[in-house]
Image: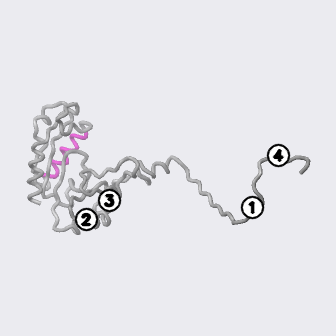
């Protein structure tokens, strides 16, 4: 994981934060002041619980000086189960590195989590990808895609605590929610119709 952390650190350092109207911006602000405060509070708790802050998005000038709801990209290493930043979903530019020794351990760790929104595996090993997608208990699964959200005509939803209600958003489940299903069962016997169908009015000569 050390090599991965170094690559991520280098990539994060080159990200530009700013207005969505700037074509050179990599990402803009979060949705509200409340969201900004919640993300920064989660980072603070992660650091206090023993996580290593590799990239600190709390200290950027745009975060401190701008009136916008900006939070810089943050990377925390050595995050472990039981830490609040691991147990809760963070909808903002903060990511955790949780170290494991094997694919099996990674799958078990994810499946034990009470949330199950989205997950991705990055690999060139088709067998590992098949094992991961088959065994993982998460609603949206990706292989070599950073954000595993399908296009609109597929079902969209997480599993476990990441799901609200019975059905999925979008896709066939949404069509079923707004419609009702009619089932028709029919059986036709060969030779049952003795004469051809006629659509003429009967006459007095018949």
Q: Are marks 2 and 3 in contact (CB under 8 Å)?
A: no
Task: Tell me which segment is drawn in magenta.
Answer: 34-47
Could you tell which of marks 3 and 4 lies nearer the N-terminus?
3
Mark 3 packing: few (<14 Cα in 10 Å), some, or many (20+)? many
Rounded to the nearest angstrom, the CA distance separating label 3 from label 1 is: 54 Å
Quadrant of the image for the N terminus? Answer: bottom left
Residue 197 in the image, given as x and y percentages of width and height? 75, 54
Residue under label 3: 138
Could you tell which of marks 4 and 1 lies nearer the N-terminus?
1
Indicate whether 178 appears above or below 184. above
Comparing 60 with 6, the one in front is: 6
Instruction: Write the residue at 10% across / 38% down.
Output: 60
Residue under label 1: 193
Residue under label 2: 126
Q: Are marks 4 and 2 in contact (CB under 8 Å)?
A: no
Mark 1 packing: few (<14 Cα in 10 Å), some, or many (20+)? few
Dot 2 lies on which element?
A: helix
- State whether the magenta stretch is mostly helix, strand or loop: helix
Q: Name the side, left or right, on which 175 lies relative to 103.
A: right
Could you tell which of marks 4 and 2 lies nearer the N-terminus?
2
Marks 3 and 4: which is nearer the front?
4
Judge whether residue 50 can be spotted in this image.
no
Rounded to the nearest angstrom, the CA distance separating label 4 from label 2 is: 69 Å
Residue under label 4: 201
Judge whether residue 40 can be spotted in this image.
yes
Residue 39 in the image, given as x and y percentages of width and height? 21, 44
Indicate whether 165 appears above or below 38. below
Rounded to the nearest angstrom, the CA distance separating label 2 from label 1 is: 57 Å
């Amino acid at each position: 994981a050390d090599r991965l952390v170094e690559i991520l650190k280098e990539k994060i350092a080159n990200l530009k934060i700013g207005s969505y109207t700037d074509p050179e911006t990599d990402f803009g602000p979060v949705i509200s002041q409340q969201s900004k405060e919640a993300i920064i509070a989660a980072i603070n708790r992660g650091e206090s619980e023993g996580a290593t802050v590799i990239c600190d998005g709390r200290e950027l000038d745009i975060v401190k000086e701008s009136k916008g709801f900006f939070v810089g990209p943050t990377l925390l290493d050595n995050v472990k189960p039981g830490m609040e930043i691991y147990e809760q979903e963070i909808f903002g530019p903060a990511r955790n590195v949780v170290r494991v020794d094997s694919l099996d351990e990674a799958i078990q760790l994810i499946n034990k989590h009470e949330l199950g929104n989205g997950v991705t595996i990055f690999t060139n090993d088709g067998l590992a990808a098949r094992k991961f997608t088959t065994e993982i208990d998460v609603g949206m699964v990706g292989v070599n895609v950073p954000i595993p959200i399908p296009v609109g005509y597929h079902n969209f939803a997480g599993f476990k605590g990441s799901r609200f209600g019975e059905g999925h958003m979008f896709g066939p489940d949404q069509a079923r929610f707004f419609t009702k299903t009619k089932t028709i069962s029919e059986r036709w016997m060969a030779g049952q119709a003795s004469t051809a169908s006629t659509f003429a009015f009967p006459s007095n000569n018949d």
